[in-house]
Image: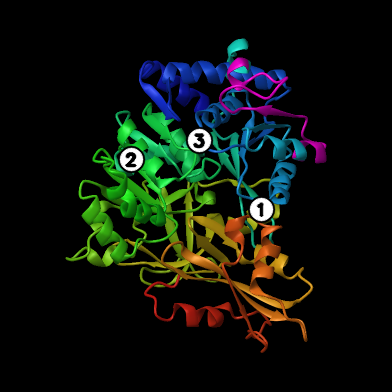
Amino acid sequence: MYSLASSLRRAAATEPGRVAVHCDGRTLSWAEVLDRVSRFAAVLRANSVAEGDRVGILAANSDSHLIAMYAVSWAGGIFVPVNVRFADVEMRYCVQDAGCRLLLADAALAETAEEIRDSLSCVEAVVRIDAGEGPAGLRSFDALVGDAQPCAASARGADDVAALYYTGGTTGRSKGVMLTHRGILTSILQWSNAVGLSSRDTLLIVAPMFHLVGGLNAMAATTLGAAMCIVGRFHVPTVLKQIETARVTKAAVVPIMVDMMIEQLAGVGANISSLRKISYGGAPMTEAALRRAIAALPHTRFYQVYGQTEGGPNISVLGPEYHVIEGARAGKLRSAGKPLPGTELAILDSEDRPLPQGQTGEIGVRGVSVSPGYWNLPEVTEEANRGGWLHTGDVGYIDDDGFLFIVDRIKDMIITGGENVYSAEVENVLSEHPAVSECVVIGIPSRKWGEDVHAIVRPVEDATVPADELIAFCRERLAGFKCPRSVEFRSEPFPLSGANKVLKRELREPHWSGDQRKV
């Protein structure tokens, strides 16, 4: 069966003694990973996890997080990595929407998980998955796994749903993106071929595993029987030292991470010459940043990735041969590259008809790795996949050489530090403040984060409210990365279209007028 379980079995059969995981001073071989997964799957089944049941994971990056993902799949369940940067109310919504029967939580999130369990009838139990000793009266994760007997893997696979990854929405509610076993494994094989990964590589897992970028890289290492170095959080000195110690060969990051690593490399004094490949996404790398990166890391090849969770997530890639400042290929640096093998792109007009090369429209994508849709949202799924194409919400064109260029967004979304923020989510919260009459949230350029969340507020008549108060109001209700970094006040009405919709492009223009890019 074409499944995550079968890919793990292969890794353990072909690379049994190879170090599979470096994490916080611990190492596991692929044989040990398989053993722990099959034992923890038995624990899950003992906790009534049945075929197709959803199991939420509230945890930072760790080897236990990896074991949990594969154990849920091995037991026949669907794993649901919850974005732990979300506010509590947002995490609770994701768990409720998915109908999670069980929550797996590390020490830092255990209390939150228990509060969610107590507030939702669907959640029957919380199981701790952090390393080391558990709190008084509870067995540690190691003890739970060690006391269980290995169980046989579920027969689920192929087009069965393997995971739900929650992403923001224009309505202000997160949507669960369904990913199948076949889709995940196809995406891994496409990506591995594009960047030349093999079982001899060691992948850095520093992007959060509750995002598909981090999760998919961990699953890619598993599928290939490669090694991975899992880092709990992005602390630059720690990351650089881990790259040196584990001899990491490939990292998946966002541009700001590259900049921060370069800035601190000399001071940390780490030898990262093993790092041969860096893939980055969320935003193009500026020419200035690329110059710094090439100078500091002359041995490293760079790959820009365009994608989204619904796309599986990788859609297109710009290879290292186009990461140049001068020469005939320099003009492609601002493109998103070409589609991965097995993925098809089209530029669609307003009636969803493919447009010729060079014309601008919405980017459509189709292929085996593309998500089959959103959990419990058939109408939204049908709208997103109309005409047989996943409508990305991004605007672009394909040049005569087949390169994709992204020029705008149809969907009202901001990408800040690699995190997606839908303006409607923030606007809905700001509108609840008694001093706010109207508000608009836009993305403005940021050298550090790519885009900053910026709020434009019309206060109610005679009201005065400090910007700090509005930002604090948001922080009580939203994940920190979604909250405005700046607030602008205006008294005049917002510009409207003929359909009485706010013309956000006019509000963005003063902020982006001096910038080469517009998204």
Among the two numbered marks 3 and 2 on one chain, the one whose residue lies closer to the N terminus: 3
Label 1 packing within 10 angstroms: few (<14), some (14-19), many (20+): some
Specify the amino acid type for callout 1.
Ser
Residue 353 visible to an observer of this rendering: no
Q: Position of residue 197 (x, y in %)?
A: 32, 36
Q: In the image shown, does 278 or 363 lie closer to the viewer?
A: 278
Residue tagged by mark 2?
250
Residue tagged by mark 3?
182
> Quick one: SS at disc 1?
loop
Q: Is residue 158 left or right of residue 425?
A: left
Q: Which mark is residue 174?
A: 1
Residue furthest bottom in the image: 492
- The residue under the point 35% across, 53% down is 258
> Quick one: SS at disc 2?
strand
Residue 400 in which image quadrant: bottom left
Specify the amino acid type for callout 3.
Arg
Is residue 129 located in the magenta-colored stretch of the structure? Answer: yes
- The residue under the point 28% across, 64% down is 332
- The residue under the point 51% across, 47% down is 370
Instruction: Give the foreground label among 3 and 2.
Output: 2
Residue 53 in which image quadrant: top right
Is residue 190 located in the magenta-colored stretch of the structure? Answer: no
Instruction: Give the foreground label among 3 and 1.
Output: 1
Q: Position of residue 436 (x, y in %)?
A: 74, 76
Q: Is residue 151 above or below residue 219?
A: above
> Quick one: SS at disc 3?
helix
Q: Is residue 454 left or right of residue 318?
A: right
Residue 416 visible to an observer of this rendering: yes
Q: What number of labels is visible?
A: 3
Q: Which residues are magenta?
A: 116-143
